[in-house]
Image: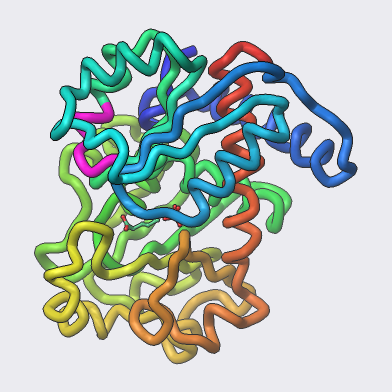
Amino acid sequence: MNKDFVSIADYSREEIESIFELTAELKAKTKKREEHHICKGLTMSMIFAKPSARTRISFETGMYQLGGYALYLSPNDIGIGKREAVKDIARVISRYNDIIMARLFSHDHMLELAEYATVPVINGLTDYNHPCQIMADIFTVKEHRGNLNDLKITYIGDGNNIANSWINLAAKLPMHLVICAPGGYEPDKATLDFAAQAGLSKVEVLANPVAAVKDADVVYTDVWASMGQEAEAAERRKIFMPYQVNSELMKHARKDAYVMHCLPAHRGDEITDDVVDSKQSIVFDEAENRMHVQKAVIARLLGRG
Ligand code: CP
Ligand code: NVA
């Protein structure tokens, strides 16, 4: 297996499914409060160049449950790529810790970190992708639906890091994936080409939300302005308002369609209160599963599971 977990694109379908088997095992143990210190004595540095709730809490708690220790490095601590070169910090941390988790702006910095670190690197989000999130998301869909057969996922909103990771997943697991974004906010072209070349899934980019959610099993959205795009928030709000996931739009999806959002949600913008709090919403299950999936990724990369 790859040394690092930087993109779903680097993993085979078998490896992804095997991570999910380990996830289910570790989740069951966690629920039963059965000790599973398979990473006893191992340590993980968590580098955060951006804010976080779920990623920090789930990784730190997960590492503790595995018997290891995780240390949080805030945006003020390392200054990766500014105070110190990425390759230097990669080599330094590799002398202290067994594994690194990082949330960075630049995806190139993530690749450089993985290249120069002698220990595994897990991507906890970059401007380009968010692989841990989408692994947790699809695991959640499978838990709720029982299988992933004939699955239609519609992602509505900005063609951002979340959209790119969904497309990478569609290159590995068969699905019908629709990305619905306004002109100029489509996802990464090279990633779309990658999924098209894989030839496993039907991946469409549409501009009309009503057409996009038709027959969808999952309607997924994310913030319109990602971390780092705060200055564009007002302008984006105007452009994206027709892409809001509200009860009117949900009428055009399957009656039993699941609603998903990686969170944090900007209630009243990309998703309305009634939809995010509806029975169809599984947003907190997906948030929970971040921890279970990431524990499996950590254990697998460390050769402990
Ligand atoms: N979904 C997610 O990654 O949440 P945080 O930004 O709070 O970590
Ligand atoms: N697209 C969002 C995801 C947050 C988990 C962002 O990058 O801010």
Q: Quadrant of residue 11?
A: top left
Based on the displayed image, in which of its 4 quarters is residue 70 positioned? top right
- Residue 201 position, x and y percent, is 40, 43
Where residue 251 appears, as percent x and y from the top left, is 50, 86
Vertical order, 118 against 146 (above or below): above
Residue at the location (45% across, 14% down)? 96
**Is residue 50 at least partly visible in the picture?**
yes
Instruction: Classify 165 as above or below 177.
Output: above
Residue in view at x 53 percent, y 83 percent: 275
Give the quadrant of the C terminus.
Answer: top right
> Which percent across, then down, holds residue 54?
52, 53
**Region in magenta:** 104-110
Q: Residue at x 61, y 38 (%)?
A: 293
Q: Nearer the viewer, residue 22 or 249?
A: 22
Q: Residue at x 36, y 54 (%)?
A: 51
Does residue 129 appear in this view? no
Ligand 1 - quadrant of the structure image: bottom left
Position of residue 286 relative to residue 35, above or below, is below
Vertical relation: 301 (above or below) 285: above
Q: Is residue 123 left or right of residue 137?
A: left
Q: Is residue 171 magenta?
A: no
Foreground of the two, 169 or 177: 169
Residue 178 image position (x, y, % from top left): 35, 59
